[in-house]
Image (cartoon, helix red, strand yellow):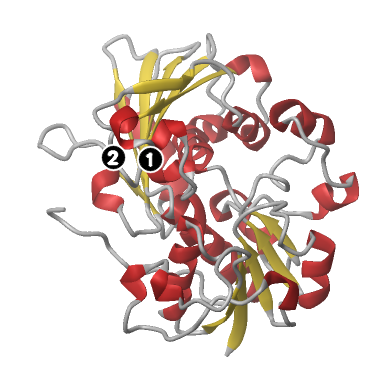
Amino acid sequence: MTRVSVVGGSGYVGGELVRLLLGHPVLELGEVTSGSHPGRPLSSVHPNLRGFTEQRFTDPSRLESCDAIIVTRSGAPSDPSLDQIRELAPAVVDCGPRLRLRDPAAYRSWYGDDPLPEAVLTEAVYGLPELHRRQLVGAQLASGVGCSAAAAILALLPLARAGWLLASPAVIEARFGSSAAGSRPGPGGHHPERSGAVRVFAPEGHRHQAEVVQALGWGADQISYAGVALEMVRGISVSVRCFLRRAVTESELWEAFRSTYQDEPFVRIVAQRAGLHRYPDPRWLVGTNICDVGFALDRSGQRLTLLAALDNLGKGAAGNAVQSLNCMLGIEEQAGLAFTGLHPL
């Protein structure tokens, strides 16, 4: 078995990683660190794990060598540095933001922090297998993805690959469930404030915009990005409104999406003419590593709405990290990620 430890295992992404690794046919759960809960059972923080493991959180400073490490957050005071982590394991996936952008200046601009050395940023593979599967194979260092960035990229990727030019910026609206804010309480997650809310919290310049621009190779002026908080716990729903420079047909759209995703195990095209579930809905993706993508074309053929949905803790974080690690280690890519979701929920 290949032993995989989780650094920062007490948050929501950490709990999802533990759940996936406990059920993985090849990867074995190693240590799970927590600076705030050392010595406590994992199930005391993640109650869904009761009866599945008796393991306890370990102190981050005592992390031991293993085959691979997944980091769920970046720069926590009690966590080892990235250099220290890389000395302990030959393969590392960092789910935090510090490896997502290759340009140090872009990272400083969007996150307001000092970036890691450029050589490290250049070495790290952006961990979205649908984009960089070949580069992930045998890689020693990979980033995670921004949850809404992954959905937006997968929605727009068929257009980018088809070479269809936009007549104006693509307007992206990403709608977030509360778990995307993490497990630490804050004013925005306080129940009286969050309950029933449809809160625009980033009407312009959400930081995930930088990932979309980098992934698609477009200019920053070709994307406009807004974030909205909704009253749901898990899930991301993204809509992208595009104006194309030439008219396209629905048949061309289907061809573009099928040619992009026909061999992708975790992307489904959901664009039916009728029915209750004809467009992507994050509700049916809870617990999965699936991203559903779809589209709606108006009569002119030049105004297009793209849609995508995923579980922010699944394909938007932990599931995608396991998928990337499978690629890095030469393991069957779908291993440990077969959960189909539930209906009704």
Mark 2 or mark 1, which has the lower sequence index? 1
Q: Quadrant of residue 64?
A: bottom right
Q: Amino acid at mark 1?
A: Ser
In three-dimensional space, the C-alpha distance between marks 2 and 1, rounded to whole angstroms, equals 6 Å
Which image quarter is the N terminus in? bottom right
Q: What percent of the width, then of the height, locates residue 59?
A: 66, 74
61 left or right of 274 in image:
right
The structure residue drawn at horizontal position 72% and vertical position 46%, both measured from the top left corner, is 98
Q: Amino acid at mark 2?
A: Met
Are there few (<14), some (14-19), or many (20+) residues within 10 Å of tag 2?
Answer: some
The structure residue drawn at horizontal position 56% and vertical position 35%, both measured from the top left corner, is 161
182 left or right of 129 in image:
left
Q: What percent of the width, then of the height, locates residue 141?
A: 74, 62
The structure residue drawn at horizontal position 68% and vertical position 34%, both measured from the top left corner, is 214
Residue contact at pointers 2 and 1, CB within 8 angstroms: yes
Q: Quadrant of residue 200?
A: top left
Q: Nearer the viewer, residue 301 or 269?
A: 269
Residue 187 seen anywhere in this rendered image of the structure: yes
Residue receiving disc 1: 178
345 left or right of 317 in image:
left
Residue furthest bottom in the image: 1
Q: What percent of the width, then of the height, locates residue 181?
A: 47, 41
Q: Nearer the viewer, residue 320 or 115?
A: 115
The dot on residue 191 is none
Q: Nearer the viewer, residue 211 or 207?
A: 207
Residue receiving disc 2: 232
The structure residue drawn at horizontal position 28% and vertical position 40%, both measured from the top left corner, is 232
Numbered disc 2: secondary structure:
loop
126 left or right of 82 in image:
left
Relative to 146, does residue 57 appear above or below in the rendering? below
Numbered disc 1: secondary structure:
helix
Are there few (<14), some (14-19), or many (20+) residues within 10 Å of tag 1?
Answer: many
